[in-house]
Amino acid sequence: MSAEAELTAVLRPRDDAPASAEARTFASSLAQLPWRRIGDAALPWLLPVALLALWFTGAEQGWISPQVLPPPQFVWETLRDLATSGDLWLHVSTSFTRVGVGFAAGTLLGLVLGSAMGLSRSVEAYLLPTFNALVQIPVLAWLPFVLLIVGIGEPLKYILIAKAALVPVALNTLQGFRQTPAALREVGDVYGYSRRQQVLEIVLPHAVPTLFTGVRLGFTKAWLSLVVVELVASSEGLGYLIVYGRQLFQLDLVMAAVIVVGAIGYAIDRLLDRLEGAVHRRRPGGAAP
């Protein structure tokens, strides 16, 4: 076959092109079927359900001693008794109060600190190196030092939780304030915007999605730090409930408290994830990335 004939064969529409288009349309319609959407929603639950089934099977077959890993039925009864007696709600409300106060203080301080560094290169040059060094120290390492200053009361928990929330909020605030396109700042200069107008009408709208991401991460860090602090120094709360069960070797109580901690943390994270998605969709420029 000559070169001209080969080129003609390549450029000629293929007979199977409509079939390929129909196949793509059919595959797209399959992806939109309700059972496909249900399958996608159920996929993340496969591993938890498998682990729960393994737990049931191991307890029934006696693979693990009940003193080491209590049967699921026993843990459920303990959890129900805690809820019925009101002890569970007491510990949950105590933990929520602590994380709420600490998270609010840490978020406020993080927003102020991040905004100051984001709006001033001089402030960033003075503070950021020291800040980056201090944030590498984990919460538990600060515990003895703060304990000597404020004692073992509630302020200790508020300070450590606030420190955990402050770090991601401050860093994301700094990043958010620095990601405004230079072209928009130049437009503001052309229209004679003051420094305050540029911050409120140009910088802040572009920084809001990143700020919200920092707030979400801050709450996650605060919740994790709450449990750690209550494990070490507390007489109430979900972390204390875990320690109390361990001291009495009531592992059913430990497992029940762990399940509550995980369920609350997961629920809050999903809620914040949805709120973050809504914020991203309303950001300047259109849909979320």
Image (spheres, rainbow, N blue to C red):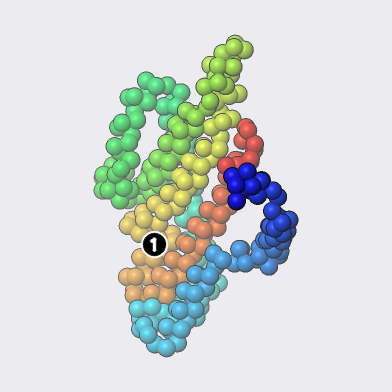
**Left of 209 or right of it: where is 226?**
left
**Left of 137 or right of it: where is 16?**
right
Q: Which residue is mark 1?
A: 240
| Secondary structure category for the residue under label 1 | helix
**Left of 64 or right of it: where is 284?**
right
Residue 97 x/y as whole percent: 49, 51
Q: Residue at x 55, y 72 (%)?
A: 84
Asked if residue 122 is positioned above or below residue 77 in the image, the reply reads: above
Q: Residue at x 46, y 33 (%)?
A: 175
What kind of residue is marked 1?
Tyr
Residue 271 x/y as whole percent: 58, 52
Is residue 155 something one can see in this rendering?
A: no
Is residue 3 something one can see in this rendering?
A: yes
Closest to the observer: 207 or 140? 207
Asked if residue 163 is positioned above or below residue 40 in the image, the reply reads: above
The quarter of the displayed image where residue 279 is located: top right
Q: Residue at x 50, y 46 (%)?
A: 216
Closest to the observer: 50 or 58? 50
